[in-house]
Image: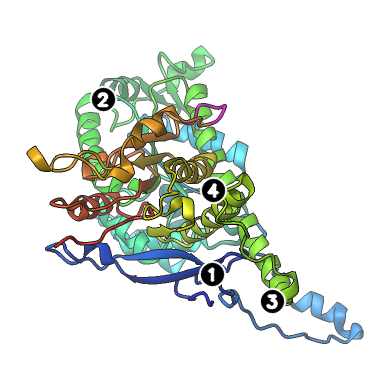
Amino acid sequence: MSMSSSLLSSTTTTTTTAIHCNTSNAAFFSSSSSSSSSSFVSCQFHSTSISFNSLTSSCRRIRINPNHLKVLKKKLKVKCCSIGIVEPLKVMISGAPASGKGTQCELIVKKFGLVHISTGDLLRAEVSSGTEIGNKAKEYMDSGSLVPDEIVTAMVTTRISGEDAKEKGWLLDGYPRSLEQAESLERINLRPDIYIVLDVPDEILIDRCIGRRLDPVTGKIYHLKNLPPETEEIRARLITRSDDTKEKVKSRLETFKNNAEAISSTYMDILKKIDGSRPKEVVFEEIVSFLLQVQKAKEKVSLLRKSVVKSNVKVSSMGQDNWRGIPTRLNNIPHSREIRKYFYDDVLYATQRAVADGKTLLKVEINIPELNPEMDVYRIGTLMELVRVLALSFADDGKRVKVCVQGSMGEGALAGMPLQLAGTRKILEFMDWGDYGALGTFIAIGSIGSKEVDAQDDVFILVAPQNAVGNCIIDDLKAMTDAAGTRPVVLINPRLKLWD
């Protein structure tokens, strides 16, 4: 069997269980009144062969005369790019005036070594250097006008494309400030790994602002209560900034909140809101935990892709005699742990690759005897075990997973739920979810529908969604996937036959 390259354009598969993967229109929406342009990934297991062709590359060997090597070293700067190399962090941080954003930026840069990018600093540097962008910005600044978004975005893009930012990663401080700026970054595919928002109540922000004082000699910011000056000499020369009056602070906060609410919709899937009213050490500790989770996820993707490349070379030269094939004795019920793990690993690997490749709607179909509800050997526990494997894998990457089982459908005589799903939710609640308490922290159990989509959810796993006589789950599915937006939704063994 061949694997369609439309599924995973940048990865291939190492599984020896045959997976037929294709991308097509979302068929389970076909009965809905409104059409959808979404696509889904279908992984079906069959006993056929596999060809690996989605990660191909053409390579040329260049012979260099050793006598010319020293000259070439002076003239050429060789860049090596490896799939196994972990990409550096890309972070955006936002916060109202006096939210402590500046302090947290200093701490983040010190710990993670990121390149700190502030639009204010960029503007001053470009104007001071007399660059083309700087001269354009200066014209607007001299006239008292705001610098247009396209100029600021151009400066940000240029800075992020610098070698130090590419190598070390970057921390974009306080930008974008409006929905238009966020959309301009989206248009050029400039997107962070995580969007951190420092959330502080207005009364605390106002108190912090009106208590701030500026040292005109050093430029350092003090606070009369929270960060008093070191000496009386410094205290005597402190001044109040013109925009730190109570009226102006309230106006700035209102503007910030309106813009922040609009921006959050762009980064909802990567947004992490942090209580910034706590001590700076506590706030930073939570920021570090989120950034370490992102790093761990990037390392896992890097290793995954690296193993894919190695396996591609290995499998392409592998003969039929060495292929591990499909497990035998599938008719032995219950299946042995080894057989179940064989298929769980294949489903997990295919799902991880699809999510890493940016797929947002995935359909997994696995019909071994224990997972085929049309056979009398069907076991609901095996399905729950597969769901647990997938959910814990995402939770290990720091993602918040919502495992969803459809509830009772219909009313009166038609009320009820499919027999295949009877008792499923209770089984999930009483299952062993590991020693570190994943259930209730990184994993939650819910139903199918748009109301189950919460801002903190990163991935949704839907357990065997299906229609029943007189009832249709299609509308709830469509509403839920629409609400999920760009967050992955994984359908495990859906049965969406339309009843007459």
- Name the disc covering residue 202, or none: 2
Verify CB contact (< 8 Å) between mark 4 and mark 3.
no
Q: CA distance from mark 1 to mark 3?
A: 17 Å
Cα–Cα span, label 4 and label 2: 62 Å
Tell me, yes or no, whether the two marked residues, 2 and 1, touch with CB atoms within 8 Å. no
- Which of discs 2 and 3 lies nearer the camera? The answer is 3
Residue 368 percent location from the top left of the image: 49, 57
Pointer 2: residues within 10 angstroms few (<14), some, or many (20+)? some
Categorize mark 4 by other alpha carbons within 10 Å: few (<14), some (14-19), many (20+): few
Residue under label 1, please give it.
10
Q: Check contact, mark 1 vs mark 4: CB within 8 A.
A: no
Q: Mark 4 or mark 2, which is nearer to you?
A: 4
Q: Is residue 127 above or below residue 334?
A: below
Q: Residue at x 34, y 34 (%)?
A: 425
Look at the image and tell me whether residue 386 can be seen: yes
For discs 1 and 4, the disc positioned in front in the rendered view: 4
User: In the drawing, what numbered circle is on residue 333?
Assistant: 4
Q: Position of residue 220 (x, y in %)?
A: 48, 30
Q: Earlier in the sequence, mark 1 or mark 3?
A: 1
Q: Give the secondary structure at mark 3.
A: helix
Tell me the element at label 1. Answer: loop
In front here: 166 or 408? 408
Q: Can see residue 219?
A: no
- Point out which mark residue 316 bears: 3
* Extent of the magenta region: 434-438
Earlier in the chain: of badge 4 and badge 3, it is 3
